């Protein structure tokens, strides 16, 4: 911002409460005009500095919005990739679980058949021993 700050003192363009005589009017009016011009210059300088700051802040705001949009797009794409990988992993796990269940059922059936066969052989041995 400008080094020139607006104060009541430098914005005061009319500083006399005394009555001005007819002969003093021209010189007092000139003095008032000079002070008013100085006040206008101070105001214009401060307004121009404020306009520069507003433009700078608007530019920063646009850059920040662009950066934020890029970040959101990047993160959204990353999330989509992670979701796709997760979905594929879940499908692979489901396939593996299905094959594991089939294998487990096969082993259970095999075990049951083997136990039944062992019982029959055991019974046959027992019968054979009893007949001796």
Image: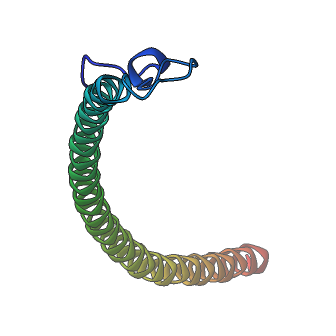
Q: Which residue sits furthest front? A: 23
Q: Is residue 108 left or right of residue 6?
A: right
User: Residue 51: x and y, percent?
Assistant: 25, 45
Residue at image location 56% in from the left, 78% down from the top: 114
Name the foreground residue: 120 vs 73: 73
Left or right of 48 in this view: 35: right
Whether residue 104 sits left or right of residue 34 in the image: it is: right
Q: On screen, 59 above or below 114? A: above
Quadrant where the image shows the N terminus: top left
Residue 10 falls in which quadrant of the image?
A: top left
Asked whether 103 or 128 is in front, the reply is: 103
Q: Residue furthest right?
A: 130
Give the residue displayed 22% in from the left and 59% down from the top: 66
Locate the C terminus by quadrant: bottom right
Q: Is residue 67 above or below residue 77?
A: above
Total number of numbered labels? 0
Q: Percent position (x, y) of residue 102?
A: 48, 84
In the rendered view, does 121 fall on the left or right side of 74? right
Give how far across and how far down residue 7 sits, in percent.
44, 19
Foreground residue, 9 or 105? 9
Question: Residue 89 falls in which quadrant of the image?
Answer: bottom left
Q: Where is residue 71 shown, x and y percent of the image?
A: 27, 56
**Closest to the observer: 26 or 82?**
26
Indicate how the structure is coloured in the image: rainbow
């Amino acid at each position: 911002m400008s080094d020139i700050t607006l104060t009541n003192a430098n914005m005061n363009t009319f500083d006399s409460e005394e009555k001005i005589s007819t002969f003093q009017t021209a010189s007092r009016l000139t003095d008032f005009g000079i002070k008013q011009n100085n006040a206008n210059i101070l105001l214009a300088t401060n307004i121009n500095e404020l306009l520069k700051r507003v433009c700078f802040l608007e530019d920063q705001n646009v850059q920040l919005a662009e950066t934020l949009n890029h970040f959101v797009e990047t993160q959204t794409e990353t999330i989509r990739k992670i979701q796709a990988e997760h979905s594929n992993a879940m499908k692979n796990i489901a396939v593996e679980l299905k094959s594991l269940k089939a294998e487990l059922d096969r082993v259970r059936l095999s075990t049951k058949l083997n136990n039944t066969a062992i019982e029959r052989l055991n019974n046959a041995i027992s019968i054979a021993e009893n007949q001796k």
